[in-house]
Amino acid sequence: MSDTDGYQEQLQSDSQFLCSDQRMDTELVDRLVLQLNRIYPQILSDKEAHRFRNLSVPTKVRLADLLKHLHRKGEEACHEFYRALHIHTEDIYSSLPSRVREREVADSKCTNDKTVRQERYVLNDRGPMFFLSCFGFVVGIAILYYYGDTEGETLRCTGVFLHCSAVRLSKDARDVFISYGEVGK
């Protein structure tokens, strides 16, 4: 539903589709009439429900009369019809012309948002191999630092190497990295 269209306008534009759709069979029309009659008797009284469930009248005629009746009843009646249709047959509800238009508008807005978000959150375009190589390098340094302890002495180059490696890191990461380097001295 667009912001300017109400349920009455939507029902008027969807009526032709609903009346011509083969999936709107007798059973479905009866379920919709019963839903509106039982839950919203102010929209569809017992007498009106009996008239719309009369099997001697063809289903398409009953459906067209029901849609005209709901359109005359007002916005709330049309809204409740759409709600009942959504509950009983989501495939018909989602294929209504008004819903298809709504999805197309939402998709066009969504694709515009996705391109903006994608450009905003891409940190680099180097790919996963760059990340894995950097991660492997850091793991190698950590292994060298922690397991480089030979007879009580750490390898001489690891502390200096950790200080040099911390140059391009953020302030917090640099502080942690340097503190690990100083612990080994």
Image (cartoon, rainbow, N blue to C red):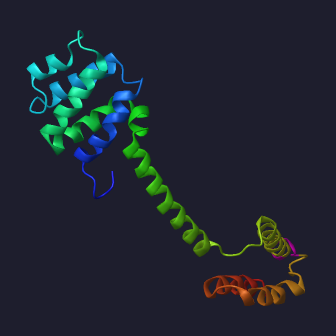
Is 53 magenta? The answer is no
Residue at left 22%, top 37%? 80
Residue at left 36%, top 24%? 24
Task: Residue 105: give x, y in percent of width and height.
Answer: 44, 57
Is 148 magenta? The answer is yes
Residue 92's place in the image compared with 27, above or below, is below
Residue at left 34%, top 28%? 19
Q: Nearer the viewer, residue 72 or 175?
A: 72
Where does the magenta region start and end? 145-149
> Which SS does the magenta portion mostly show?
helix
Residue 180's place in the image compared with 16, above or below, is below
Q: Quarter-wise, where is residue 57 in the image?
A: top left
Residue at left 79%, top 66%? 132
Can see residue 130? yes
Task: Residue 99: give x, y in percent of width and height.
Answer: 39, 45
Q: Quarter-wise, where is residue 159 in the image?
A: bottom right
Q: Nearer the viewer, residue 113 or 176?
A: 113
Can see residue 86? no
Residue at the extreme top of the image, as rendered? 56
Task: Residue 95: give x, y in percent of width and height.
Answer: 43, 38
Q: Nearer the viewer, residue 107 or 146?
A: 107
- Left or right of 141? Residue 178 is left
Task: Residue 176: give x, y in percent of width and height.
Answer: 66, 82
Image quadrant where one finds the C terminus? bottom right
- Left or right of 103? Residue 42 is left
Q: Nearer the viewer, residue 165 or 100?
A: 100
Residue 35's place in the image compared with 116, above or below, is above
Q: Quarter-wise, where is residue 127 in the image?
A: bottom right
Residue 57's place in the image compared with 68, above or below, is above
